[in-house]
């Protein structure tokens, strides 16, 4: 199969089958320690219109009441070999670590069957926080940072699952990056489910060329060699490695300058057809994107329009990069 024929099937970014795990309190479930919630309208109303949420509350799931005593992460005693912070009730010192660990193990078995494509977790929680959750010493002073016990177990079990905290999703670039990864994960799962063959893998890789060039340029070639070995090596092993490297590469934080380069590269396929007005409009949109005034979806929509209207070759027109997720998903709206 040639590179061009690998692209014969059109890209479908509007997959109807995106499933995202989420801390239940972010959806408005009143499960927090104080009996309240912390609903985020962008999640419930914008992202929720494009994905099915699978809500999880580890603390209620493991049998704790609502409301319940405050808990926090505490550094283990110095003589303990396992240096992972413990989850402890602040007032009484009761250690709930074993309880949440065994509940998490069973829950993660269940979530493996739910075939999730991403997970959004509540920041700062001793159960759900992923990054920089306060860890206290035995004098009650914050002395370190760590991950909540459920979040840590989730990341260990599904190392390539796109995982974000709701607070970090306030950053538009992180939000776009998360959505790109979630939709890539959904497309990958759909390829495995509906096709799963070597030719389909080549097509998948061809369609993700510019998405990879924008985030990890060296990985596109590396994965190209891997895909080329699919006829010789065990296909299942190739697919496992491909998924891992793809998701690692897409998680890289790229720069706006590199994205502008990728868009300009794509436009090279139709540059002789662009009018003065096209170029002027394009320059303006790229400038606004470069200075952070508009999300990447704005110049990308223009690039896509120009490639389609000037009949660019299929390998350019059908890049996932041009429509990494459903275009009606408005990344620019406030949380
Ligand atoms: S942060 Fe996690 S454990 Fe705490 S209320 Fe929300 S879902 Fe439950």
Image: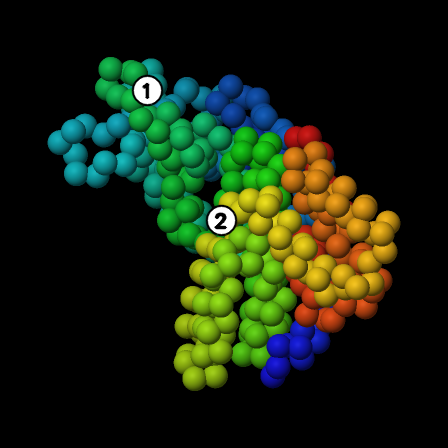
Q: Quadrant of the C terminus?
A: top right
Residue at horizontal 72 percent and vertical 65 percent from the top: 269
Q: Quadrant of the N terminus?
A: bottom right
Query: For residue 80, which quarter of the picture?
Result: top left
Estimate the x, y position of residue 268 in percent, counting from the top left. 71, 62
Estimate the x, y position of residue 193 in percent, counting from the top left. 58, 69
Query: For residue 37, which quarter of the picture?
Result: top right
For the rendered model, the colour scheme is rainbow
Quote the CA–CA distance across marks 2 and 1: 30 Å
Residue at horizontal 54 percent and vertical 34 percent from the top: 168
Measured along the vertical axis of the image, is residue 27 above or below residue 9? above
Estimate the x, y position of residue 121 in percent, counting from the top left. 51, 37
Question: From where the camera sits, is residue 28 visible?
Answer: no
| Circle 2 or circle 1, nearest the eye | 2
Q: In this view, does 329 lie to the left or right of 164?
A: right
Estimate the x, y position of residue 314 in percent, counting from the top left. 72, 71
Secondary structure, mark 2, is loop
The disc placed on residue 252 is 2
Q: Is residue 239 left or right of residue 207?
A: left
Query: For residue 41, which quarter of the picture?
Result: top right
Is 88 or 168 nearer to us in this picture?
A: 168
Point out the tag, 2 or 1, that comes first from the N-terminus.
1
Q: Is residue 182 left or right of residue 42?
A: left
The residue to which callout 1 is attached is 142
Secondary structure, mark 1, is strand
Residue at horizontal 59 percent and vertical 40 percent from the top: 173
- Label 1 CB less than 8 angstroms from ligand 1: no
Measured along the vertical axis of the image, is residue 301 above or below residue 86? below
Measured along the vertical axis of the image, is residue 263 above or below residue 221? above
């Amino acid at each position: 199969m040639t590179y061009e024929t690998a692209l014969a099937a059109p890209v479908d970014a509007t997959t109807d089958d995106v499933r995202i795990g989420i801390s239940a309190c972010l959806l408005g479930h009143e499960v927090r320690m104080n009996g309240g919630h912390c609903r985020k309208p962008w999640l419930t109303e914008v992202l929720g219109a494009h994905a099915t949420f699978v809500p999880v509350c580890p603390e209620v799931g493991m049998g704790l009441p609502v409301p319940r005593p405050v808990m926090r992460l505490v550094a283990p005693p110095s003589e303990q070999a396992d240096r992972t912070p413990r989850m402890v009730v602040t007032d009484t010192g009761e250690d709930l670590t074993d309880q949440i660990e065994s509940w998490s193990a069973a829950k993660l078995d269940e979530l493996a069957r739910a075939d999730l494509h991403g997970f959004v977790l509540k920041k700062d929680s001793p159960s759900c926080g992923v990054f920089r959750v306060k860890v206290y010493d035995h004098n009650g002073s914050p002395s370190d940072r760590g991950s909540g016990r459920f979040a840590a177990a989730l990341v260990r079990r599904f190392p390539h699952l796109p995982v974000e905290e709701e607070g970090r999703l306030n950053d538009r670039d992180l939000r776009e990056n998360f959505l790109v990864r979630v939709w890539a994960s959904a497309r990958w799962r759909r390829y495995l489910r509906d096709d799963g063959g070597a030719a389909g893998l080549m097509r998948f890789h061809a369609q993700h060329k510019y998405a990879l060039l924008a985030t990890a340029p060296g990985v596109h070639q590396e994965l190209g060699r891997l895909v080329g070995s699919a006829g010789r090596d065990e296909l299942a092993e190739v697919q496992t490695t491909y998924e891992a490297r793809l998701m690692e590469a897409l998680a890289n934080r790229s720069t706006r300058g590199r994205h502008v380069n990728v868009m300009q590269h794509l436009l090279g396929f139709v540059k002789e057809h662009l009018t003065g007005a096209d170029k002027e409009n394009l320059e303006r949109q790229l400038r606004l994107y470069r200075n952070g005034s508009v999300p990447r979806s704005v110049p990308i929509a223009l690039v896509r329009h120009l490639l389609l209207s000037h009949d660019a070759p299929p390998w350019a027109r059908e890049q996932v990069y041009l429509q990494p997720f459903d275009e009606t998903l408005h990344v620019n709206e406030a949380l």
